[in-house]
Amino acid sequence: MNSPEHGNAHKILTLYVNPAWRRGGIHSPLMNPWWGNPIVEESIFAKQFFDTHSFDTSYYSITDDIAQADMVFPPYSHNWLLLHDPKLFDECVRVAKESKLPMLIDGIADVEHPINVENSYILRYGGYRFLPERGRIQIPPLADDFLERYKGGVLEVRKKREGKPSIGFAGWTVLSPRQYLRTIIKEIPIRLRGIIDSRYRACVKGVLWRQKAIKILRKSPLLICNLLARTSFSANPKTAQGDMRKLREEMIDSILENDYALDVRGDANDSTRLFEILSLGRIPVIVDTERNFPFSDKIDYSSFALIVDFRDIKYLPERIAEFHKNISPERFEEMQRNARDAYVKYFRIDVLTKSIVEELRKTLTPQK
């Protein structure tokens, strides 16, 4: 399991993983270079993605020799361990404490359970700006490179048109009466807190924010709306209603064939869609629900996106129309190139490795 530093100028990060910790479940994608892609064929897009893309092992390695390690790494997500093998997580914590090494924890999930482990760093893609978490390493959801996969990697920049701007969206926005009632009951505490502190209103379920945004956009005479409101999540074989490949093509068309692409949070306070839009080189309109935007200290999101605070969602059509009216044709095209560049330089899974390791290196205290 030991890996050399490949002669690189940078020192790679070495993670301790005991081979006895391997189980039969879906391991963290950080382990894919060594343990393979665990995703089954039924999950078409996830399997396709991890068969093609991987974290860059020139920046990190794993070892079974604790003396060679920089950190201890439980090889499964925190949520999986809580559900299937909490004793294994406890063992990883014990090993880290006894060896006086920090832990790296895969906390990537739509539902983020609190992690109260001293000297730990947690990979997350959701969360809220007003609810900070110690040790959080904010990363984007792992999004496929749609331009490479579906368009041969060729970016066709859209020209600015005269008249009303168009906005596209295809995704889950409809709840059944039972789902809606269950959601509202579950959210009562959050909604009550939102009366006192408006920031907590951002915690409302993502599908309801999408529903609201689409309703507002459709009522407006200021825009051309190409919005496909679906009754289920179409990227999962258990919930997709219809052929998943056709649904995926419709979603991609909704991004490429419009001036702007709507991006609203999902179950986590983030959205894979945002990074899919960027991969295609289009300008997202982001409804910002107090999101933690990854690498915001390095990246100017306004260089490729229109961001509208969720408290201003009723003005969404006006903001888009005004933005489009005032942007020059040259700037409109530049923002599309910026979107693609941001994805390639910061958000694609291979380059993401460098940013994660750099962030960890900045915060880690030398252990040896």
Image: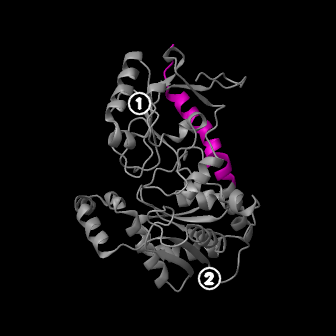
Name the colour scheme: one colour
> How far across and down, in percent of the image, does residue 167 sit?
58, 75
- Give the quarter of the image for residue 246: bottom right
Viewer-proximal residue, 249 or 346?
249
* Secondary element at image label 2: loop
The answer to whether residue 87 is above or below residue 240 is above
- Which residue in the protein does label 2 denote? 164
Q: Residue at x 42, y 41 (%)?
A: 107
Q: Residue at x 64, y 74 (%)?
A: 258
Main SS, magenta region, reads helix
Magenta span contains residue 210: no
Q: Earlier in the sequence, mark 2 or mark 1?
A: 1
- Which residue in the protein does label 1 denote? 120
Whether residues under marks 2 and 1 lie with C-beta atoms below 8 angstroms apart, the answer is: no
State the separation of the CA atoms marked 2 and 1.
50 Å
Q: Residue at x 38, y 43 (%)?
A: 79
Q: Residue at x 63, y 31 (%)?
A: 59
- Near mark 1 (Cα within 10 A), the count class, few <14, some 14-19 or many ≥20, is many
The answer to whether residue 295 is visible is: yes
Task: List the single residue furthest toward the bottom.
Answer: 221
Give the residue type that dot 1 points to. Answer: Ser
Left or right placement of residue 269 versus residue 63 in this view: left
> How far across and down, in percent of the image, does residue 72 sit?
46, 26
The magenta-colored residue range is: 341-368
Which quadrant does the N terminus fall into? top right
Which mark is nearer the camera, 2 or 1?
A: 1
Viewer-proximal residue, 74 or 203?
74
The answer to whether residue 192 is above or below residue 51 is below
- Give the quarter of the image for residue 4: top right
> How far across and down, in percent of the image, does residue 58 sit?
66, 31
